[in-house]
Image (cartoon, grey):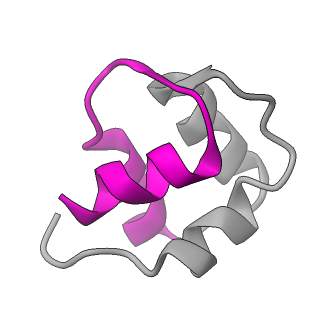
Amino acid sequence: MSEPQNPIEVQRYLGGVDYPADRSALVDAARDSGAPNDVVSALEALADTSYDSPTAVSEALAR
């Protein structure tokens, strides 16, 4: 990932996600919501673990 994603933009594409959610659920939700490739790529680059909240996803993207 070349630069950190805007957490507000990312969360816009993850609006229907039930947490906890793993990386693949986040990627699928983003694709289903029509997220641009850079957002999908950023989510694909996350560690393959369970995220318990939107905040946890935003923090992981900021790393």
Q: Main secondary structure of the magenta part?
A: helix
- Can residue 25 be found in the magenta stretch? no
Q: In this view, does 50 lie to the left or right of 59?
A: right
**Quarter of the image that includes the N terminus:** bottom left
Q: In this view, does 12 lie to the left or right of 1?
A: right
Q: Which residue is drawn at 45% across and 81% down?
A: 6
62 and 42: which is toward the camera: 62
- Rendering quarter of residue 59: bottom left
Residue 31, x across and y down, in percent: 65, 49
Does 51 appear above or below 33?
above
- Rendering quarter of residue 36: bottom right
- Can residue 49 be found in the magenta stretch? yes
16 and 57: which is toward the camera: 57
Report if residue 41 is visible in the image: no
Q: Which residue is drawn at 26% across and 29% down?
A: 47
Q: What stretch is highlighted in magenta?
A: 36-63
Q: How many labels does the image show?
A: 0
Does 17 appear above or below 61?
above
- Rendering quarter of residue 2: bottom left
Report if residue 48 is visible in the image: yes
14 and 52: which is toward the camera: 52
Residue 35, x across and y down, in percent: 62, 65
